[in-house]
Image (cartoon, helix red, strand yellow):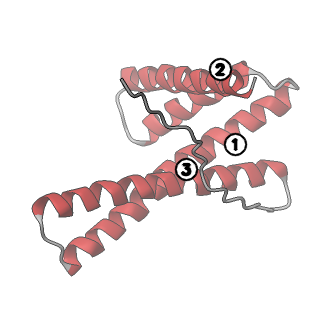
């Protein structure tokens, strides 16, 4: 019986940019804001496109609504990312070490701050701090696994 196969590779496009605000803390914070903010905006664009295709109609009002939602979601997630990156960098400078503990504490503080700003109840602030720390720690471990 004949047997076929496919061989190839898939690479993502490279889009590199540098942010120079004059200080490493500001550079990393703004870079995190821009990168993750763009991801948040793209997420909304994909969701809104799917909804328009599913309903079969597109209007000027729906496009304007989608653009506003993209900006709002991008700004929200960009702000969260900027806070996380800034906090993690600050912890790294204070501790003098670059390891998973910085990610854990940075994620926990960011989760607590975002939750507190959104007026969640006290138990939600703690829960979101734990979740933020766990996600940031897992991301740090996965980054080191894939770079080895």
How far is disc 2 from disc 3 in space, using C-alphas?
A: 19 Å
Q: Look at the picture and state if 83 lies above or below 63.
A: above
* Residue 77 visible somewhere in the drawing: yes
Badges 2 and 3: C-beta atoms under 8 Å apart?
no
The numbered mark, 1 or 3, whose residue comes first in the sequence reads 3
Residue 60, above or below 102: below
- Outermost residue on the right side: it is 96
Image location (x, y in percent) of residue 126: 45, 21
According to the picture, the residue beneath numbered tag 1 turns out to be 86
Q: Residues within 10 Å of mark 1 (few under 14, many from 20)?
A: many
Q: Residue at x 65, y 25 (%)?
A: 140
Q: Is residue 87 left or right of residue 67?
A: right
Q: Closest to the observer: 77 or 148? A: 148
Q: How far from the left and from the top, in percent, is residue 71?
A: 42, 64
Image: 148 above or below 110 = above
Q: Which residue is mark 3?
A: 36
Residue beneath the point at 62% across and 23% down: 142
Mark 1 vs mark 2: in front:
2
Q: Is residue 80 left or right of residue 98?
A: left
Instruction: Kindly identify the residue that appears in the image at 27 percent across and 69 percent down.
Output: 65
Q: Can you tell which quarter of the image residue 54 is in?
A: bottom left
Q: Nearer the viewer, residue 119 or 105?
A: 105
Residue furthest to the bottom in view is 60
Residue 26 position in % (x across, y down): 76, 53
Which disc number belongs to residue 96? none
- Which label number is shown at residue 141? 2
């Amino acid at each position: 019986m004949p047997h076929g196969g496919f061989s190839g590779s898939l690479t993502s496009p490279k889009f590199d940019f540098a942010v120079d605000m004059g200080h490493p803390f500001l550079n990393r914070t703004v870079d995190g804001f821009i990168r993750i903010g763009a991801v948040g905006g793209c997420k909304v664009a994909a969701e809104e496109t799917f909804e328009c295709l599913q309903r079969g109609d597109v209007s000027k009002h729906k496009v304007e609504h989608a653009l506003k939602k993209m900006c709002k979601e991008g700004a929200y997630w960009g702000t969260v990312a900027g806070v996380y990156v800034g906090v993690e960098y600050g912890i790294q400078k204070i501790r003098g070490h670059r390891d998973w503990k910085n990610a854990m504490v940075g994620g926990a503080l960011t989760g607590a701050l975002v939750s507190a700003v959104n007026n969640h109840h006290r138990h939600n602030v703690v829960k979101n701090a734990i979740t933020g720390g766990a996600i940031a720690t897992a991301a740090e471990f996965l980054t080191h696994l894939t770079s080895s």
